Image (cartoon, rainbow, N blue to C red):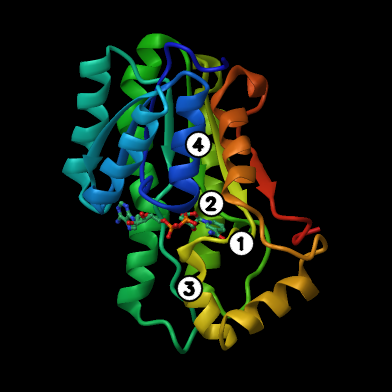
């Protein structure tokens, strides 16, 4: 197993990519602290991990609450004696172009898609520095490396968090702490419901994906979970500061 005796904390882990990543990290031997704004789903994923013989705890956590986010990370490091992996995953997608996005929704996008990752990474720094190692995975998107259709708040903040990841990677590379941005393309989770509505329904979205994505399909959460395990583990030990794009070729 790749992650034996490692401790991981994942935000937004009650559904979709975060949940699949949490399960995959546990399968590789990590103890996973499964957190989500929705405590019920976080507990359900932790229970699924434990039922499968893995190690997990659950915690209700809204990443827009700074104190709670810092406390979750600090208390995990204290209780477990270490923190090896932070997957800062929760995010929000507000659709619309310039004249359609409210200032409040732009602020919310910054708060979730950039600021919460800053707060989480800052809190993880202490334990990772003491260990002389750590892997921080920040979920951006392939919208962080290309323009997105009528998604000004999303594309702007996903680009910004990629810049922040690169900066942190450069600043802490000598301390053995790696920072990489996970950049998925279309993955079939509830996250795309807003875009589905914008496109005019599920059928239209599927048609769009068949036309626009070179591979002609959605990615699966398991395909992204494999990327998460790679970034979390020593398999990516010489990789820091990069956008790890897994998108069926969409942004080439
Ligand atoms: P999902 O909708 O399946 O799960 C999102 C989870 O985050 C939910 O369990 C929800 O309760 C939780 N959450 C929402 N707001 C939260 C908050 N303030 N604090 C803590 N938890 C919160 O979504 P999925 O597919 O896992 O995507 C989430 C992340 O992945 C976002 O950062 C998104 O930008 C990114 N992403 C997703 C893609 C996709 O096609 N699904 C593509 C590219 C990036």
Ligand 1 within 8 Å of disc 2? The answer is yes
Ligand 1 within 8 Å of disc 1? The answer is yes
Real-space CA distance between mark 4 and mark 1, rounded to the nearest whole angstrom: 16 Å
Residue 13, position in %: x, y? 38, 45
Say whether disc 3 or disc 2 marks the residue closer to the N-terminus.
Answer: 2
Residue 18, position in %: x, y? 45, 45
Are circles 2 and 4 on residues that touch, CB within 8 Å? no
Are circles 2 and 1 on residues that touch, CB within 8 Å? yes
Q: Secondary structure at mark 4?
A: strand
Are circles 3 and 2 on residues that touch, CB within 8 Å? no
Q: Residue at x 62, y 52 (%)?
A: 220
Identify residue for label 3: 193
Dividing the image into four equal quarters, which quarter contains ligand 1?
Answer: bottom left
214 displayed left or right of 130: right
Are circles 4 and 3 on residues that touch, CB within 8 Å? no
Say whether disc 3 or disc 1 marks the residue closer to the N-terminus.
Answer: 1
Real-space CA distance between mark 4 and mark 3, rounded to the nearest whole angstrom: 24 Å
Task: Name the mark on residue 140.
Answer: 2
Identify residue for label 1: 143
Q: Residue at x 35, y 74 (%)?
A: 105
Q: Is residue 86 above or below residue 4?
A: below
Identify residue for label 4: 137
Asked if residue 166 can be seen in this view, the reply is: no
Extreme-front residue of the structure: 51
Q: Secondary structure at mark 3?
A: helix
Are circles 3 and 1 on residues that touch, CB within 8 Å? no
């Amino acid at each position: 197993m790749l992650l034996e005796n490692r401790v991981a904390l994942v935000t937004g882990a009650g559904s979709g990519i975060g949940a699949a990543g949490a399960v995959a990290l546990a399968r590789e031997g990590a103890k996973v602290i499964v957190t989500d704004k929705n405590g019920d789903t976080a507990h359900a994923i932790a229970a699924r991990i434990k039922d499968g013989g893995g190690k997990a705890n659950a915690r209700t956590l809204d990443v827009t609450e700074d104190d709670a986010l810092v406390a979750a990370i600090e208390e995990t490091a204290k209780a477990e004696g270490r923190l090896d992996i932070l997957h800062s995953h929760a995010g929000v997608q507000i659709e619309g172009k310039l004249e359609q996005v409210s200032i409040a929704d732009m602020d919310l996008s910054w708060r979730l898609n950039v600021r919460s990752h800053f707060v989480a990474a800052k809190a993880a720094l202490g334990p990772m520095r003491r260990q002389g190692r750590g892997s921080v995975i920040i979920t951006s998107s392939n919208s962080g490396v290309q323009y997105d259709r009528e998604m000004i708040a999303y594309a702007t903040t996903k680009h910004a968090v990629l810049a922040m990841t690169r900066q942190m990677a450069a600043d802490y590379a000598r301390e053995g702490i790696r920072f990489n941005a996970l950049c998925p393309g279309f993955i079939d989770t509830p996250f795309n419901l807003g875009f589905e509505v914008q496109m005019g329904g599920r059928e239209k979205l599927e048609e769009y994906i068949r036309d626009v994505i070179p591979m002609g399909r959605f990615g699966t959460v398991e395909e992204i979970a494999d990327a998460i395990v790679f970034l979390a583990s020593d398999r990516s030990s010489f990789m820091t500061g990069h956008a790890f794009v897994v998108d069926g070729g969409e942004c080439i």
